[in-house]
Image (spheres, grey):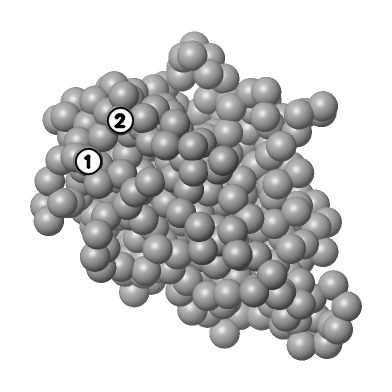
Amino acid sequence: MTDRYHAAACQTSFPCPRKREEIADRVTRMVAMVEGTIVGYEPFFDVRLFAFPEFAHAAPVYTSVAELDRHLAVELPNEHTDRYVALARKYGIHIQTGSFIERRRDMPGRVFNSTALVGPSGVLSIYRKVNPWLPWEIHSSPHDIPDYPDELFPVVTTELGALGVATCYDWLFPEAIRQLAFNGCEVGIRISAYMDPWGATPPMDWWTLINRTRAVENTMYVVAANQGATLEGYPPFSWPGGSMAVDFDGRILAQADPGAGEKVVVAPIDLAALRAERIRRIGHDMRSHLRSEAYPYMQRAVLPRGVESPITDASIRARIESGRRNLS
């Protein structure tokens, strides 16, 4: 077990992909970013955990599930995750990959926004975004699939601590990150494509606000990698970057200057300090202070499960309207 190490939040700035054949070049560049960071920072820091942004491999640039499946979707694990595994084994590191558009043979007609946690022993977990960014993302949520066989919020015990991940919009739902915490997460990883104006610049610096708040709420570290792509490369959005790491008291340990472009920031993770505080604290331990029974809203169905396949813009908007009616 490694009690102290450094984590790297790595932001990318690729043009918007249109076909799966472009993924290999992106992986090549991200592998180079990892190796450059390890070598460059070696005299100063032991960088052991790497996180890349949402859509680093592929983005939902088509308006139908069929087109996404035809042009961009891949199965996981695959030859790209194999390259990350080889890299992790070479250096003894862990990598939270950027997201893929994932297809599953056992769930035809659906695609998922998925990321893999990779370590020296292989692919350790696959997380599928539970809260797609409505109404624009037409990925399926695993929550909506009857008898979904996997854990919605997997947490993996590693030599770098208990690692969990959630993707971009997931982090605007306190319940999602609280579930990671109750699953044992110590280092929460956020992979994001968080566009302007909700970035790291006041007055609407949601990115920074949410990362710090979730860290405090759950007494956990947060390592957050955001897209740094330009408007030219990713119309109609521009991406503010600002990749960062936050400690369990909400202190910003490191943050990239806001703005487009490739950037890497490294920050210390002190698991011994985190664990000591989780044991010692009586005050501000919101996990143990949680009055679960006081919040019956969690037992009330709001957004209907999207059992339709394939998902369309019209079906998403109809579900949103149903969710609004359920609020009244």
Q: Amino acid at mark 2?
A: Ser
- What residue is rendered at 76% in x and 44% in y? 209
197 and 39: which one is in front? 197
Left/right of residue 274 with respect to residue 122 in the rendered view = right
- What residue is rendered at 46% in x and 14% in y? 235
Q: Secondary structure at mark 2?
A: helix
Q: Residue furthest right?
A: 283
277 and 179: which one is in front? 179
- What residue is rendered at 55% in x and 61% in y? 298
Q: Earlier in the sequence, mark 2 or mark 1?
A: 1
Q: Secondary structure at mark 1?
A: loop
Q: Which residue is mark 1?
A: 308
Q: Residue furthest front?
A: 328
From this viewpoint, is residue 58 visible? Answer: no
Numbered mark located on residue 35 in the image = none
99 and 88: which one is in front? 99
Counting from the top left corner in percent of width and height, residue 133 is at 47, 36
From this viewpoint, is residue 124 visible? Answer: yes
| 285 vs 204: above or below | below
| 314 vs 236: above or below | below
Q: Quadrant of residue 243?
A: top right
Q: Are discs 2 and 1 less than 8 Å apart at CB? A: yes
The quadrant of the picture occupied by the N terminus is: bottom right
| 32 vs 122: above or below | above
| 59 vs 271: above or below | above
Q: Amino acid at mark 1?
A: Glu
Numbered mark located on residue 315 in the image = 2
- What residue is rendered at 80% in x and 81% in y? 277
Left/right of residue 234 with respect to residue 57 in the rendered view = right
Q: Residue furthest bottom?
A: 279
Q: Could you tell me how far apart the alpha carbons at marks 2 and 1 are, in whole angstroms?
A: 8 Å
